[in-house]
Structure formats: C-alpha cells, structure tokens
C-alpha cells in the first residue's frame, strides 16, 4: 500500500515551556519527499514478509526473535549475558532467578509481554501508565542507588544527570527537575496523539517518540530499554510483526551510529537546521527494512529445514536410506550449518555408527546421501545439510 506523510508537517510542531529546563520543542523534523521512498521500501518488505508461510513457523520465530532482541537491548545497556545464556535464562521460571544479570533479561521479557498485550488491545495508544509500568518491569530487582521502579526522576541539587559521552557526539544535560520531566513526558504523550490523529505513519511516529523520550530521559535507570519498548509497541500496534523487537539487534550491531545520532539530531535542532531528525528516522527505517528482510530469509530457512526433516524421515521409512544415513543427516540438520567431514568422522556419535563396519560401508553411505542430495560436500570438504546447496558442491563421483 502507499504510505504518505501529512502535507503540512510544520503544523505538528509543539513548544513546551518548563519551569527550570527552559523551552522544549517537539517537531517531526524530516524531509517528506526523501522519507516517503524509504517508507515504501519498508512497507514493500513487510508485505512480502507477511505473505510468507509465517503460521508454519510462528512459534519458533517468536522464540528466536525474543531471545535475540532481549540479548540485543540488554547488551546495549551493558548486560553481560551471551545470547545462549539469555536463551537459557528465559527458559527458567522467573521466580527462580536470583542473579542480577539474569534478572535484567527476565525483566525485559516481562516488558515485552506488556508491550504485546498493549499492542493487541483495540484502540490502545501511548499513555503514562504504560510507560511507568514498562519501567517498573524493566528495573524491578535491579540494584541502583537512586532508581525506583516506575518512579520518575527528580534530581536533588547535588546530583546532575548527563546522557552520552564525547565519543558519541558529546554529553547532554536532560531536564533535572521532576516537575519539568513530568510535564515533558505528558507533552510527549499528547504530541504522539496529535501525530496519530494527523495520520503520520507509525514508521515515523515510533522513532520520533523514541528520540524525544531519550532526550527527556525521565528515569534514573532503564531509559534506553524503555525507549526501545515504546518504539516497538507503537510499531506492533500498527500491525508490524516480529521486526519491532528484532530491531534491537540492528541497534546493537550499529551501536556507535545509534548513540551518536541522538546527539546529531539534538544539535541540529538547537542550530535550527532544516529536517534535524531526518538522520535518526532514516536510520530507523533502514534498520526496519534490513530487519524484515533478515526475518523473511529466516522464515524461508526454517521452512526449508522442516521440509528437509520430513524428507529424510520419509526416506528412512521408505527404506531408501538406512538408520546410519538418517543419523548423519539428522546431526547436520540439528547443527544447521556445514561441518568439516573430518570433524564429523571423529565425533563419538559417528564412530559408534561404523565401529564394526569397514571403510567401504562408510563411503557407500555417504555417497548415497550425496547422490540423493540429502547432503552436499563442498570444495573445502565440509558436509552441508541438504536444505542448502553450496555454490562449490562436489559431484557425488568426485570422491569422498
């Protein structure tokens, strides 16, 4: 479908006066002509994605996206769990989690669950209660000298909050006074409602709210995680699937650009440059397009793996392959990637298959699997599962 931005974006500018911080201006700050092509590319990618057989792989894709996203957004903020460790933690009963690093991951998952419930609620729109609850969930049980889950920051005179660093465009001093922060947070929510009523697409609203939310920086801790949850929820509520949370991995991969762009846009606005928010919105849109395409490729791969699993099972049932050959194919399927043939031959499971058999039997088994294209051998003598064919696959008569 065609996505258009409202004709007069200047009418969507909102200036808010605060008691101590001074004036704060919310503006779309984009060039509509340049944005619309990027919007259409994201929408085209999303339409292709949702037309793929998602229902067949929904459960697995959901699990993978949640793990990858929790890992990504947690690592951005200094979390130390690996992706595999994150997956293990999310499989636990949250009530059994005691370590702080594990609690961080469990908390993000709880905020994701809140986000999904909100996005599925008819007529839902961004509100203060949602933001405070997201913050409470994200920071509960995490030690911090000042932060209170669900409570807005109010700096005492001897405590100054700064955001950012010189390596990413400089330090920024957000509002310090609690009443200013509350006023600006409410203004941000109202401004989002104005953007929504004006018909500004969620693909633009979401990064703009993310950008200004981080400038307000309303909490002592957890602002980045909450900001990304808000962004993802706005996108989910608009019908975008999986990609809103998976986008956190794009931000992690491009973390220097992600942090720097907050300062680039803020400084451009201070200098009253045209379209100051364009770089961050473009970064977001490009990330959404790339993320959707990666998810689409992943769906295709999972489908291919399911078909492969079915094919080797049928081949075994029909006695076209034996149990040894089925085990080899299954092991490759389980790994999901090519393995050096020599590594396979040294693996305990493989040596046990041929413990009492001669080398010719081993060669015949492998030759038959390759002949049936259930496995491939490449020029580097790596064995590939049959759901993906390497460009340099050897013919079966080329020798094992």
Image (cartoon, helix red, strand yellow):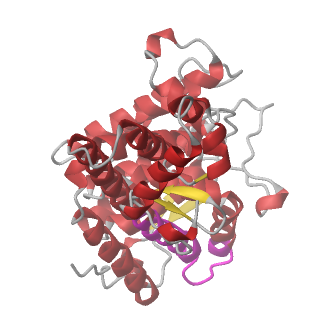
Q: What stretch is highlighted in magenta?
A: 268-293
Please say if 212 is above or below 5: above
- Which residue, as the protein is rendered here, is positioned at the far left? 122
Q: At 23% from the left edge and 46% from the top edge, which residue is drawn?
A: 314
Residue situated in front as seen by the camera: 335 or 288: 335
Q: At 33% from the left edge and 64% from the top edge, which residue is drawn?
A: 202
Please say if 85 is above or below 381: above
Q: Can residue 45 be seen in this view?
A: yes
Q: What is the tally of numbered marks visible in this picture?
A: 0
Residue 134 picture quarter: top left
Please say if 109 is above or below 256: above
Question: Residue 251: percent from the left, percent from the top?
Answer: 58, 57
Residue 85 picture quarter: top right
Most common SS among magenta residues: helix
Residue situated in front as seen by the camera: 189 or 297: 297
Residue 351 picture quarter: top right
Question: Residue 348: percent from the left, percent from the top?
Answer: 61, 29
Residue situated in front as seen by the camera: 377 or 57: 377
- Indicate whether residue 28 is drawn in magenta: no
Q: At 68% from the left edge and 65% from the top edge, which residue is drawn?
A: 257
Q: Can residue 17 be seen in this view?
A: no
């Amino acid at each position: 479908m065609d996505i258009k931005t409202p004709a007069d974006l200047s009418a969507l500018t909102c200036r808010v006066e605060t008691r101590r911080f001074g004036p704060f201006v919310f503006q779309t700050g984009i060039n509509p002509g340049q944005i619309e092509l990027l919007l259409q590319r994201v929408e085209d990618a999303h339409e292709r994605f949702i037309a793929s057989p998602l229902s067949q792989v929904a459960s697995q894709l959901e699990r993978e996206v949640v793990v990858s996203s929790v890992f990504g957004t947690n690592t951005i903020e200094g979390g130390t769990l690996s992706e595999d460790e994150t997956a293990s933690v999310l499989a636990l009963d949250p009530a059994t989690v005691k370590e702080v690093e594990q609690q961080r991951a469990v908390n993000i998952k709880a905020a994701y669950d809140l986000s999904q419930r909100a996005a599925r609620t008819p007529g839902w729109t961004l509100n203060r209660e949602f933001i405070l609850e997201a913050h409470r969930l994200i920071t509960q049980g995490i030690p911090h000298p000042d932060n209170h889950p669900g409570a807005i920051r109010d700096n005492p005179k001897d405590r100054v909050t700064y955001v950012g660093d010189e390596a990413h465009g400089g330090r920024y001093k957000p509002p310090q006074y609690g009443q200013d922060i509350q006023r600006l947070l409410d203004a941000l929510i109202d401004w989002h409602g104005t953007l929504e009523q004006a018909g500004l697409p969620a693909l633009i609203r979401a990064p703009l709210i993310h950008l200004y939310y981080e400038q307000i920086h309303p909490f002592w801790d957890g602002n980045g995680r909450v900001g990304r949850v808000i962004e993802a929820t706005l996108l989910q509520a608009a019908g975008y699937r999986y990609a809103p949370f998976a986008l956190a991995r794009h931000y992690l991969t491009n973390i220097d650009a992600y942090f720097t762009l907050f300062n680039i846009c803020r400084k451009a606005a201070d200098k009253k440059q045209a379209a100051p928010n364009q770089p961050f919105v473009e970064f977001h849109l490009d990330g959404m397009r790339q993320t959707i395409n990666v998810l689409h490729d992943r769906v295709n791969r999972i489908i291919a793996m399911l078909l492969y699993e079915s094919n080797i099972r049928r081949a075994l049932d029909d006695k076209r392959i034996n149990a040894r050959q089925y085990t080899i194919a299954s092991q490759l399927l389980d790994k999901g990637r090519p393995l050096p043939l020599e590594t396979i031959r040294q693996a305990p499971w493989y040596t046990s298959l041929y413990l009492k058999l001669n080398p010719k039997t081993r060669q015949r088994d492998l030759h038959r699997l390759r002949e049936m294209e259930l496995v491939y051998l490449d020029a580097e003598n790596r064995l590939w599962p049959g759901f993906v064919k390497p460009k340099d696959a050897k013919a079966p008569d080329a020798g094992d």
